[in-house]
Amino acid sequence: MTRGGVFLIRGGRRLEGRIAPGGAKNAILPIMAASVLTDETVSIENVPRLLDVEVFSEIVRELGGKVVRENGRVTIQGGTLRETTVPFELAQKIRASVLLMGPILARFGRVEVPVPGGCDIGDRPIDQHLKAFESMGAKVERVHGQWVLSCRKLKGARVDFDVRTVTGTENVLMAAVLAEGTTVITNAAMEPEVVDLARCLKEMGAAIEGEGTPVITVEGVNSLKGVSHTVLPDRIEAATLLLAGVITGGSVFVEGVRPELMEAVLDKVDQAGAVVTVNDGGVGAAATGRLKSVNVSTSPFPGFPTDVQAQFMACMCIADSVSTIEENIFENRFRHVAELRRLGADITVSGRVAVVRGVERLQGAPVTATDLRASAGLVLAGLVAEGETEVREIVHLDRGYESLEEKLNALGAEIMRVEGEKIENPA
Ligand code: EPU
């Protein structure tokens, strides 16, 4: 499905209408990893076409598993899986490949995962994952650029995270379900995607309590069974679509998403002056004139998500005053700032704080996407910039959004994807 290419956005259209997000990428990836824990078939429903899902499927196939995609369903059979080494080339393409560490170790007593390099948004160490596996009895070695973990049988342990880590919590959860005895995870991540993974593991026969709170208790079981699991709607895609409406002075209702999972974002949208609607069917926001500048500070769930920081910053670029945006999760997640400036935004960055002085208008220009959420921020800015904005390296966007341009166009945007390089001066 590799699409990528360039978006040509004609700015100035007001977005209006109802739209539904796909399943949550950050729940799908750990659940795909969890499928390795059983010989039986795991079916995941509501899976959008995402590059990250494709790469993860490829990794599971390389390990010997069978992965089939049919419409919105991904079916995984881990029974034939024998290989314990996550292939280097594919692991380089997707950091979430580290999620296979826990399940492969739990099932085979051994796993080799390439040492992750830095990434577009920061260093992203995995020391907390390794420390936890060690406390569960695994031997952890670094051999020729790979983390090699081995154990006879994982043992339940107390895992006190120094840092609240989403994939770390998920990794330990997946290892603990087949470990001997009880594992207690403290300072656990409370993200809805962690809860969805726990829900899926429980459907597979795991004994887990406390998911969604900072303390999760897992009682190891001997084996897990197959399951058909429908993943929760993507709250980050939902927020992106909602903000696309808000930034264009429009009104968008996002169907199917659970409002209580989006409170921090909805609060800020409300403070920015948009009228927020919340009901059983989803969440909506309608702009009511120029946006007000509001301050945002990212933090783990239930705080304001780092994955919506770039999109919210795009909105603040045209707000009425000055806002500060503090990024507390990743140390290098402001790469969209330089690109937003090309569109006329007035932003200065000092350490983890960006000061955004709202301007009257943005102007279209060529910009380059640097990572998934930065791409989304640039697309939102392009929707409101005068004239044409060309967003390059859209391949980043395809990692986590299925055909975002089609969804935005359905709401009234004017975005064209030119696959491959943009053709200069087409005849
Ligand atoms: N950290 C450590 N040591 C560790 C693990 C994490 O120091 O062993 C630090 C990280 O460097 C970071 C903080 O802890 O500063 C939080 O990182 P976390 O581990 O929670 O992030 P992650 O699990 O690698 C997931 C999502 C990200 C999302 C973050 C934060 C997946 C596959 N990825 O990453 O999603 O931004 O949680 O919510 O679930 C995205 O979708 O665009 C994306 C980057």
Image (cartoon, helix red, strand yellow):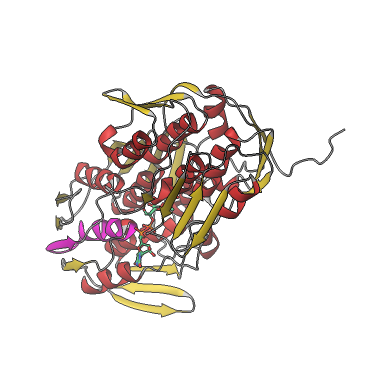
Taking depth in this image into account, of 48 and 320 the one nearest to the observer is 320
Which region shows up in magenta?
A: 167-186
Q: Residue 273: x, y in percent?
A: 39, 32
Q: Is residue 309 above or below residue 120?
A: above
Q: Is residue 162 above or below residue 359?
A: below
Residue reaching furthest right? Answer: 427
Taking depth in this image into account, of 174 and 389 the one nearest to the observer is 389
Q: Residue at x 54, y 38 (%)?
A: 380
Q: Residue 264: x, y in percent?
A: 31, 42
Q: Residue 102: x, y in percent?
A: 31, 61
Taking depth in this image into account, of 70 and 400 the one nearest to the observer is 400
State left or right for residue 170 relative to residue 253.
left
Q: Residue at x 56, y 42 (%)?
A: 359
Q: Quadrant of ligand 1?
A: bottom left
Q: Residue at x 54, y 24 (%)?
A: 14
Q: Residue at x 55, y 62 (%)?
A: 89
State left or right for residue 214 relative to residue 321.
left
Q: Is residue 185 shown in magenta?
A: yes
Q: Is residue 218 shown in magenta?
A: no
Instruction: Identify the image quadrant of the C terminus.
Output: top right
Q: Is residue 399 above or below residue 246?
A: below
